[in-house]
Image: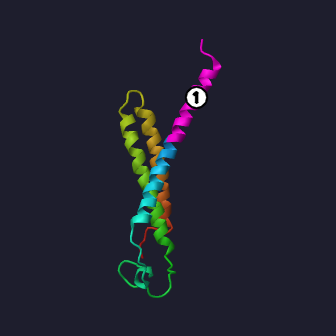
Amino acid sequence: MTDYASLVRDYYGSYVLVAVLFLVGGGIVAGGLAANRLLRPSRPTPEKLTTYECGVDPVGEGWAQSHVRYYVFTYLYVVFAVDAIFLFPWATIFSAQGYGAVTLGEMFVFLGFLATGLLYAYKKGVLTWV
């Protein structure tokens, strides 16, 4: 029978190992950043300190409004991307013995919810670009 002290020592020993690995990794990153700071040239000029935006000199204010429709398209894309990700595991489980009818029913319920959301977005006029 093992004693309690050796079990606790082994248990906390694994955490000490993880902490040491984090410290070593942090030291490597900090050393690399420090070496970069010490070895790089630093010659700031007014041209280097200006805002650079795709090769075009900044003109005007930095505030620009976007139409909310672009965000709605983004959310719809995310919903259907998640749907596509859900379809792949479903397709693999569908072929397993005994799961066919259950997973088929679940998928029809899931696709029904997505179709309802798409129909709602269409009725609200979200899918019209202009």
In this view, the residue in front, 10 or 79, is: 10
Could you tell me which quadrant the C terminus lies in? bottom left
Q: Indicate the position of residue 82 as horizontal and vertical percent values.
A: 44, 51
Residue on which the image places disc 1 = 11
- Residue 8 on the magenta span: yes
In this view, the residue in front, 22 or 55, is: 22
In this view, the residue in front, 115 or 64, is: 64
Specify the quadrant of the image occupied by residue 38: bottom left
Above or below — where is 11 with respect to 52?
A: above
Magenta stretch? Answer: 1-20
Q: Is residue 26 visible?
A: yes
Query: Tag 1, which secondary structure?
Result: helix
Could you tell me which quadrant the N terminus lies in? top right
Q: Amino acid at mark 1?
A: Tyr
Q: Residue placed at 41% from the left, 54% from the top?
A: 81
- The crowding category of the residue bearing disc 1, from other C-alpha atoms within 10 Å (few below 14, some 14 to 19, many at least 20), is few
Q: Indicate the position of residue 101 as horizontal and vertical percent values.
A: 42, 33
Q: Residue placed at 48% from the left, 61% from the top?
A: 75
In this view, the residue in front, 68 or 36, is: 36
Above or below — where is 80 with respect to 60?
A: above
